[in-house]
Image: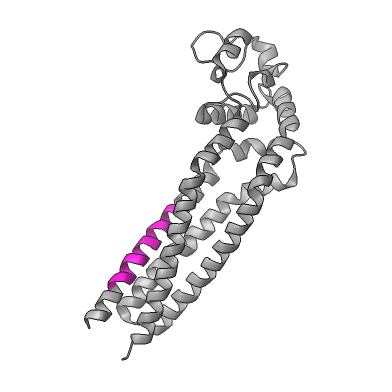
Amino acid sequence: MCYSGLLKTFMFIFNGVIFLAGAAILAVGIWVMVDSSSMLGVLSHIKKAPPELAQLANVGYLLIAIGAVLAPMGFLGCCGAVTESKCMLLTFFIIVLIIFIAEVAGAIVVLVFQPLAKELLMTVNEKFVESIRKDYGRDEGFTKLMNATMTQLKCCGYNNYTDFTGSPFETRNNKYPETCCNNLTTCTPSVAESSSKPGCFSAVVKFIEDNTTLTRGVALGIAALEIAAMVVSMVLYNNIGK
């Protein structure tokens, strides 16, 4: 009885964490989809961008799908432990195993895609600058997306402030966006140059590099949790009725 109770306690802990993780991932996925100020929204306005970049727009849907599976899965594991239902525990084990295999496959894809991602963003450089000089200050939607992205990432243009040279905004106002300058004075070329704001490409790359270690740690933690949950569910499954 004590052994069985300990297994149930472990199942509650594991599945409680899985449920909370699923709810968090679901919330992040919804936030990504409704947050029109994200970098993905800006990329979607670029004409003739590499087709691989279009796949980045599916990140929000992927997060929502993962969260929508993890949250009820954690609830299913808890119910299976409480009711000592072999059917629920077996279903839980199969679902976790499928997700674990999918995560391993996804990790392999990410490792392969990571060097390619930077190369793709570099190839889109010319088209991005062309879009800025054509649409910034003319297309209201694109202008808002660029402003929000530059504000969030504290960056200016794709490479630097010179990307805005010749844009409708710069031509009409004879100045650069305020986010390209550090002070409240008019953002003239000399002020923008002295401010030395980094381009958004550099800011995105730095953000990814700074969070790589944390992301890997979280991924390994989730994988270890899933393995432990599968082991405990199978041990509990085999002990039911004994």
Residue 24 part of the magenta-drawn span: yes
Please say if 73 is above or below 25. Answer: below
Total numbered labels placed on residues in the image? 0
Residue occupying the point 41% across, 57% down = 21
Residue occupying the point 65% across, 9% down = 174
Residue 170, position as x, y percentages in the image: 67, 14
Q: Which of 161 and 172 is in front in this view?
A: 161
Type of secondary structure dominating the magenta stretch: helix
Q: How is the image coloured?
A: one colour
Q: What stretch is highlighted in magenta?
A: 9-25
Residue 153, position as x, y percentages in the image: 52, 30
Q: Seen in the image, is 124 located left or right of residue 182?
A: right
Quadrant where the C terminus lies?
bottom left
Residue 176, position as x, y percentages in the image: 62, 15
Please say if 70 is above or below 174. Answer: below
Residue occupying the point 32% across, 65% down = 13
Residue 1, position as x, y percentages in the image: 22, 83
For the question of whether residue 58 can be seen, the reply is: yes
Residue positioned most to the left: 2
Residue occupying the point 38% across, 72% down = 77
